[in-house]
Amino acid sequence: MISIKNVQKIYASKQGQVKAVDDVNIEITEGEIFGVIGYSGAGKSTLIRMLNGLEIPSDGTITVANRVVSKIKGRSLRQARQEISMIFQHFNLLWSRTVKENIAFPLEIAGIDKAERTNRVNELIKLVGLEGRENAYPSELSGGQKQRVGIARALANNPKVLLCDEATSALDPQTTDSILDLLVDINKRLGLTIVLITHEMHVIQKICHRVAVMEAGRIVELGSVLEVFKNPQQPITKRFVQQVTEPEETKETADHLIERFPKGKIVQLTFVGEATEQPLITNLIRHHEVTVNILQGKINQTQNGSYGTLFVHLDGDIKEITRAIEYIRSQLVGVEVLTNA
Ligand code: ADP
């Protein structure tokens, strides 16, 4: 569906040239949810903007649905854009128009007649779950509802590809999850190819099939979400794994737990793509003479397996504890023994 070949983008700025995208090669299959993760300045926006012709590559070729989008202009570009829609972090809605008028807007531009427009808008409103809010203005909607309007509007012309530019970054975690669920639903129901860029590992982990990790304009790792995050090769990828597995309050949590359990050891376990934590804990109890206390933590279940972090307290003979920790290390990517004697 999408082919990105040897693509480069160089911006000329006052300080000289900036290589925003540096020799990127990606092939994305029809029906895939493909994520690009990277920190700010990595080149993600530039890359995604080149997919719908908002930026022209300095070098290389981009093909979307058999059309070379890196070369076209004018009318052909406008036609191509009907097949490649985009949603944005700050929704980009028209504030003086109601929900249904926002959704109808691309249909008006495409010259669809009024009766057909009304039917299509009603279908879309149902698809994104906005029944009852048709006549509301954007200022009367929650963030999640605004993004639902954005999604409905993006789908109005039956695109083949949906580009998502940090589409959940302005939303709280619960709303983020409901929008991500909606994207998965749309991907399944319509067979739509989705490309999303984000700096949040959670988003990738929850819905993407494959991921590319981007740093300084280059793709430094690419593969299935499980593969990449279960066995991260690059330091930057490891940092993204820690983002979901190490809550910010880890240090405080650790200090607090160590105070509560001065005996034995407290171990922080990082799960990435494991089926569940249950078999590990069961094996620990069965094969090692230690008592295992699950203290706290959070494991998220997603379509890519589960991920998250758990703090457990192991007590018993020190040799047994050491063996138990060795066993855990053989099973998980991240095992941190917190510093109690
Ligand atoms: P990201 O989306 O990952 O934050 P961007 O694609 O926005 O990254 O930016 C990549 C690099 O290109 C940055 O160094 C940024 O400053 C530079 N850049 C982006 N857009 C422009 C522009 N229009 N002119 C000059 N430099 C730009």
Image (cartoon, grey):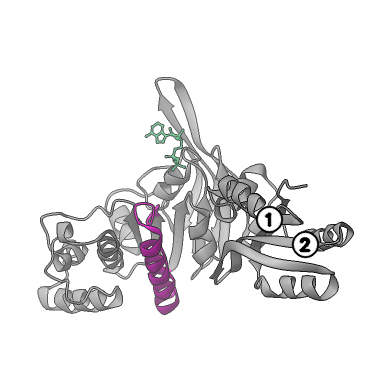
Q: To which quarter of the image does residue 110 belong?
A: bottom left
Dot 2 beta carbon under 8 Å from ligand 1: no
Query: Is residue 75 found left or right of 263 in the rendered image?
Result: left
Identify the residue at image location x=45%, y=67%: 193
| Depth order, front residue of 269/192 | 269
Numbered tag placed on residue 198 in the rendering: none
User: x, y percentage for residue 5?
Assistant: 55, 50
Q: In this view, does 21 lie above or below 315?
A: above
**Which quadrant of the structure image shows residue 126?**
bottom left
Secondary structure of the residue carrying numbered label 2: strand
Question: How many numbered marks appear?
Answer: 2
The quadrant in which residue 294 appears is: bottom right
User: Label 2 belongs to which residue?
Assistant: 315
Q: Do the residues labelled 2 and 1 touch (CB within 8 Å)?
A: yes
- Report the side of 23 relative to 54 (left or right): right
Q: For the residue carrying disc 1, how many other residues have a C-alpha within 10 Å: few (<14), some (14-19), or many (20+)?
A: some
User: Which residue is more in the foreground, 62 or 87?
Assistant: 87
Foreground pick, 213 / 76 = 213
Q: How far apart are marks 2 and 1 (CA)?
A: 9 Å
Residue 40 percent coordinates (x, y): 46, 40
The quadrant where ligand 1 appears is top left
In the displayed structure, would residue 335 be above or below residue 190?
A: above
Can you identify the residue that label 1 sits on? 261
Q: Which amino acid does label 1 sit on?
A: Phe
Determine if the magenta segment contains residue 169.
yes
| Residue 262 among those drawn in magenta | no
Q: Where is residue 124 in the image (x, y as percent from the top left)?
A: 25, 74
The secondary structure that dominates the magenta segment is: helix
Which stretch appears magenta?
165-192
Q: Answer yes or no: is residue 265 visible.
A: yes
Label whose residue precedes the other's in the sequence (2 or 1): 1
Q: How crowded is mark 2: few (under 14 residues within 10 Å), some or many (20 or more)?
A: some
